[in-house]
Each structure stands twice: as structure tokens, then as C-alpha cells.
Image: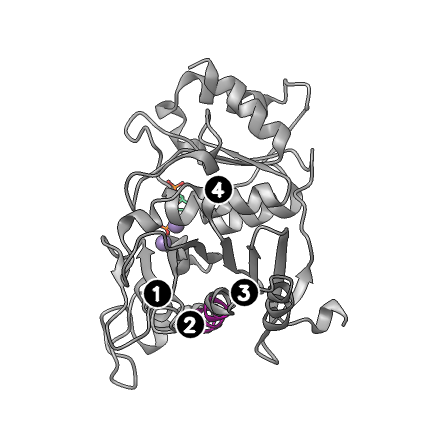
Amino acid sequence: MSDSMMTVERFIAEQERLHPDATGTFTDVLLQLSLAAKIIARSVTKAGLVDIVGASGAKNVHGETVQKLDEYADDVIVEVVGKGGSVCGIVSEESERITTIPETYEAGPYVIAIDPLDGSSNIDVNISVGTIFSIHRKRSAGRDAQDSDALQPGAEQCAAGYVHYGSSTMMVFTTGAGVHAFTLDPSIGEFLLSHRNMKIPSPGKRIYSVNEGYTNKWTSGQQRLVERFRTGTGEEGSFSARYVGSMVADFHRTMLQGGIFMYPGTADAPRGKLRMLYEVAPMAMICEQAGGLASDGRNRILDIQPRELHERVPAYIGSPGLVELAERYLLED
Ligand code: AHG
Ligand code: MN
Ligand code: MN
């Protein structure tokens, strides 16, 4: 079958067939996430119409209250995946606690962590946003997920992925056997295989991606690292700077072109801004599966044991040589 006709459903089913003990439940989680992504994509592309049909909190022409898009995206995933019989808990950026499954629905053996809408402040200016997800297998006994089921090191993820709502909508994920990307063909409503077995270019383009507005709040190692990139004085030569401000978009470019994406700690926020469970750990798994590296500046992200559902972690993700270079500078702090 040609890749251009390989739907995400078929691809996942074929992967699952390689595992004779598989029950299909894991496939269900991914398929439900891909359905949720299509529903969210439909709303993201209409977001500009909010000005026409009514702003958040206001009533639209149908008399319905218009929700903020990140809350809407959260509701869609909770509805589609949470009630689909394959998960027993959802950790979301939008909810302080883990959401368990009402008794009237079946609870499955997986726990997901989600950033339903990443880069949401970019929605108002029509810049790309995304959804990030991570899937763990439940470890605790009993029907409902416990926090400990989500608080596993990234290396234990069964799968991780993101959806990029850009000039086209793409779903990129790994189940631990390479990274594959699917592009939504809106005319048939299907995600079709567009990038099989993605590899991050190494050395790749020399691009650094970081919010330089925080320079004065960085550690000296971080300042010197970016100074090296900015002035092109290292042996790698000169660099370009790119920063969208949506992690999914910045990371997606890094996956395709190479470079390094950074969200360092600052004097005010030593752990940075990004969250381990539903932003950094999933991207770290994807990046490593594509041949890249992901570090908090000192440690491999995937080895870190998270302690809290919404804990933050500094992030250095991208082409291996550049992540190693960052670690060398940060060691000096
Ligand atoms: P979210 O919209 O889910 O809160 O995430 C926004 C994040 C991430 O997408 C991006 O990399 C980062 O915020 C940008 O933060 P700064 O504006 O501080 O650079
Ligand atoms: Mn985010
Ligand atoms: Mn978000």
C-alpha cells in the first residue's frame, strides 16, 4: 500500500498486529486521540470567526456560549478518550487533579497526560498551535488511576505524540518504534502517512530557538551558550534564531530541520515554564526516537522521576551535538 493511502488507523492496526498479545486497547487510545485532533483542528481553523460569531464567554449566533479554545480542546479529549473505554485517568494542563472515569463508563488500563492546546496565546494572532499527549500504562491496582500512574519517568511512556495545527494539520507520534507523521487531508477527513520513520537532522541546520527576552534572568552558562550561537564564534559557525512561542511549532521545525529548542530556568523560575508530564517528557521521547537528545541541562529528561503532576522542568531538546554542547556550558554554572 502506498504511503499516500496509508491512514493512521491502518498504520496503527498494522503495528499492533506485530504484537500477538495486544488486545486493541492501546490502538483505541491512539485512534481516539486522532479523532479528538480532527475535532480540535476543525475549531482551531475557525478560531478567527470568534470575532464574527462572538468572543469567549459571549453567545454566538446560535445562542451557545463560546468557550475558550484550550478549555474546548480539553473537553473534546476528555469526552472522546475519557469515555472511550481505554483509559482510567487523564492528567491535563487544564485540571489541577487527575480526572478519573465516571462509573457509567468503562475504565481501561492506560493513563494519558495532555496539553490540550499548546501555544494558546498565539491563537489570537493566527499563529500555529498544537496538542501534546503522553500515554502510560497503569501500575496501581483498582479501577481508577492514581497520581502515581502518571508520575512515571518518561522512559516508561508507551507512546507520545503531538498534533500541529499549522498550514496543514499533522499528527506525529511514536510508540517506541520510530516516529511517524500523518498529515490531515481535509477533503477525506483522514490522517495520511506523510513522514515514515522521521530522523532529526544531525548536525542539521544551525538554528537555536529560545525566548531571548529573558537573557538577563539566565544563568551565566546559559548566557554564554546563546552568546556563542548569536555571534557564531564556536566551531559550528553561525546560527539562525527562530522562536514561534508555541512549543509544538518550534519543536516540529526542530524535528524537520535540526537545531536546538530551549526553555531554560530563569532567576524567577529556576525550573523554567514547561511541564514535564505533558510538554517535555513526550517531546523528549519523540526526539530520542528520531535520533535526537533531550536534557534538563544536566540529566536525560526521560530518566527523571516526576514528583508532581504539573511539575516544571528546564528543556534542551534537539540535534544531539547541540544538546551535548548546551550541557557542557550549563555544567559550568
Ligand atoms: P501553553 O499555551 O500550553 O500554556 O504553552 C505555552 C508554552 C509553549 O508553547 C511555549 O514554548 C512557551 O509557552 C512560550 O513561553 P514564553 O512566552 O515564556 O517564551
Ligand atoms: Mn503548552
Ligand atoms: Mn496549553
Q: Is mark 1 within 8 Å of ligand 3?
A: no
Question: Whole-percent x and y of residue 144?
Answer: 27, 61
Residue at mark 2: 43
Residue 293 within the segment the image draws in magenta: no
- Tell me the amino acid under the disc marked 1: Leu
Query: Which of pointers 2 and 3 lies earlier in the amino acid sequence?
Result: 3
Tag shown at residue 296? none
Question: Hey, what amino acid is under mark 4?
Answer: Ala
Q: Quadrant of ligand 3?
A: bottom left
Residue 155 numbered mark, or none = 4
Q: Measure the C-alpha gap from mark 3 to mark 1.
A: 35 Å
Q: Going from the N terminus, do you reach mark 3 or mark 1 first?
A: 3
Q: Which one is in front, 232 or 85?
A: 85
Residue sitting at x 28%, y 73%:
66
Label 2 CB-ligand 3 distance < 8 A? no
Task: Determine the CA span between mark 3 and mark 4.
Answer: 20 Å
Q: Measuring 46% from the left and 70% from the top, which residue is drawn there?
A: 32
Residue in the image at 49% along x and 57% along y: 128
* Mark 2 or 4, closer to the camera: 4
Q: Residues within 10 Å of mark 3 (few under 14, many from 20)?
A: few
Q: Which residue corresponds to mark 1?
A: 69
Quarter of the C terminus within the rendering: top left
Q: Is mark 4 within 8 Å of ligand 2?
A: no
Q: On the image, which quarter does residue 71 sit in?
A: bottom left
Segment colored magenta: 31-42
View extreme (top): residue: 332
Q: Secondary structure at mark 4?
A: helix
Check the image and report above or below for 305 versus 228: below
The answer to whether marks 1 and 2 mark residues whose Cβ atoms lie closer than 8 Å is yes
The majority secondary structure of the magenta stretch comes to helix
Kindly check if marks 3 and 4 are in contact, taking CB atoms under 8 A apart as contact.
no
The Cα–Cα distance between marks 1 and 2, rounded to whole angstroms, is: 8 Å
